[in-house]
Amino acid sequence: MRNNLRIERIVGIPLAAGLLALTACAEVQQIAEEQARRSGNPQLAQAIQGTGTLISGLLPIGEEEEQSLGTSIALQVVARSGGLYEQPELTRYVNLVGRAVAATSDRPNLEYRFAVLNDQSLNAFATPGGYVFVTRGLLKQVKNEAELAAVLGHEIGHISQKHMLDVIQRTKQIAGISQAGLAYANQDPRAFQQLIDTVAKKLLDEGYDQGKETQADRLGVVFAARVGYDATAYLGLLNRLKGLRGDDRALFKTHPNFSARIAAVEETLREKGYVKTGAVLADRFSQVSSKL
């Protein structure tokens, strides 16, 4: 069914308006201990101490906690990236394309939200729970809807593989936080805010490691192709960025260079048997993005 999605029918999806209506985190409930007891996992059971707290990192972050974390980090991304670019037609368009691609991902049931950052840098970000951002600067380098779909698919790949949650778990251990998940937030909001600040700074200043970026590139191509977009279009954008930045100036120092990313995408195209077919929709993209 996923492969039968038609781009021409990417209409009528409720307008999420990106993150224009972002609010503070939902109230966090202390559920860590109860989840551990119900899990039947001996490792978790042994981790419960006399006070009822859990050793850091043993309890996976659940979807409710992921959403709360993602919202908090997303607010930081907006605040540190020049705010949102409030162009409703463009925001709606990015949401329509992004949600169509997200529907083909490995986690289609999340409530994905897409927004454009008023930032001229060449970048895109994703936070847990389904928040995806693309900068004005990067959109200016995109030439068609198929390329946009792959960019958004890349960020959706980070979410589907829970890459940021891995970072958060490691950050919790470094910070010495003793309770898993968000159960400590009400007890120590300062520690919670410190965690959010640390993770947001890493996301904005460093990005993910090379393995996670390569995996996201591969998934972005696959997710976009499932909708019906030209799977090879992403190569055009990567080569364009390589020409602008060069291999010695990747988006982040932790990213693979563009030659390595292009090679990984080409390998995925060969493995999947993708050829230069499918929708590109350059005119539709141009009409919406002309005011950038």
Image: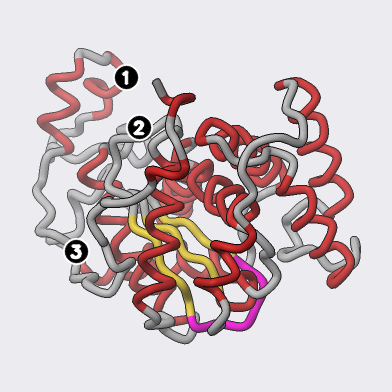
User: How far across and how far down the image is residue 113, in percent?
Assistant: 34, 57
Colour style of the rendered protein structure:
secondary structure
The numbered dot on residue 58 is 2
Is there a contact, CB below 8 Å, between mark 3 and mark 2? no
The quadrant of the picture occupied by the C terminus is bottom right
Q: Quadrant of residue 48?
A: top left
**83 within the magenta span:** no
Residue type pointed to by label 3: Cys
Q: Residue at image x 33%, y 66%?
A: 18
Residue type pointed to by label 2: Leu
Picture layout, residue 166 above or below residue 125: above
Q: Secondary structure at mark 3?
A: loop
Residue denoted by label 1: 43
| Mark found first going from the N terminus, 3 or 2 | 3
Examine the rendering and report whether any part of residue 79 can be seen.
no
Is there a contact, CB below 8 Å, between mark 1 and mark 2? yes
Q: Quadrant of residue 140?
A: bottom right
| Mark found first going from the N terminus, 3 or 1 | 3
Residue type pointed to by label 1: Gln
User: How far across and how far down the image is residue 166, in percent?
Assistant: 48, 42
User: How far across and how far down the image is residue 46, in percent?
Assistant: 26, 21
The quadrant of the picture occupied by the N terminus is top left
Task: Please identify the dominant SS of the magenta region.
Answer: loop
Q: Nearer the viewer, residue 82 or 49?
A: 82
Q: Say few, some or many: other residues with alpha carbon within 10 Å of mark 2 (under 14 / 14 to 19 / 20 or more).
A: some
Q: Which residues are magenta?
A: 118-123
